[in-house]
Amino acid sequence: MGSIFFISHDGESHEAALADGQSLMHIATRNGVPGIDGDCGGVCACGTCHVIVDGGWTHAIQPINSEEAQMLSMTPERQANSRLACQIKVSSAMDGFTVHLPEFQM
């Protein structure tokens, strides 16, 4: 089994077990990662699971779709590697996958 790493805005690292086929948001909420609320339950209807994908991992995730891009356009802390964790499907090849959390969520 592998691990996923969530790095808070203040640099604190939260490790969670990789769950193949699950969304990154579900992994975060099941593991109590602070800063990932997932208020909409993972249907891309809020911005409470905004993450910034570590630059070395952008190749490992599926491309952003227009619905996700629209939700992220309302996020003041959006960066080039910003994604919604509910839209990132985790695979076993993502051991060590790392995301950073913005200071504020929507």
Image (cartoon, helix red, strand yellow):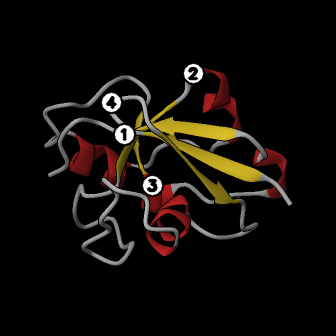
- Tell me the distance, in whole angstroms, between the alpha carbons under discs 2 and 3: 15 Å
Task: Tell me where residue 91 appears, x and y as whole percent.
Answer: 76, 57
Q: Amino acid at mark 2?
A: Gly
- Residue 46, quarter of the rendered image: bottom left
Residue at mark 1: 101
Q: Which mark, residue 25?
A: none
Residue at mark 2: 55
Residue at mark 4: 10
- Tell me the distance, in whole angstroms, between the alpha carbons under discs 2 and 1: 14 Å
Closest to the camera, between mark 4 and mark 2, is 4
Assign a secondary structure to mark 4: loop
Assign a secondary structure to mark 2: helix
Q: Amino acid at mark 4?
A: Asp
Of the image marks 4 and 2, the number of the one nearer the N terminus: 4
Q: Residue at x 32, y 25 (%)?
A: 79
Quarter containing the N terminus: bottom right
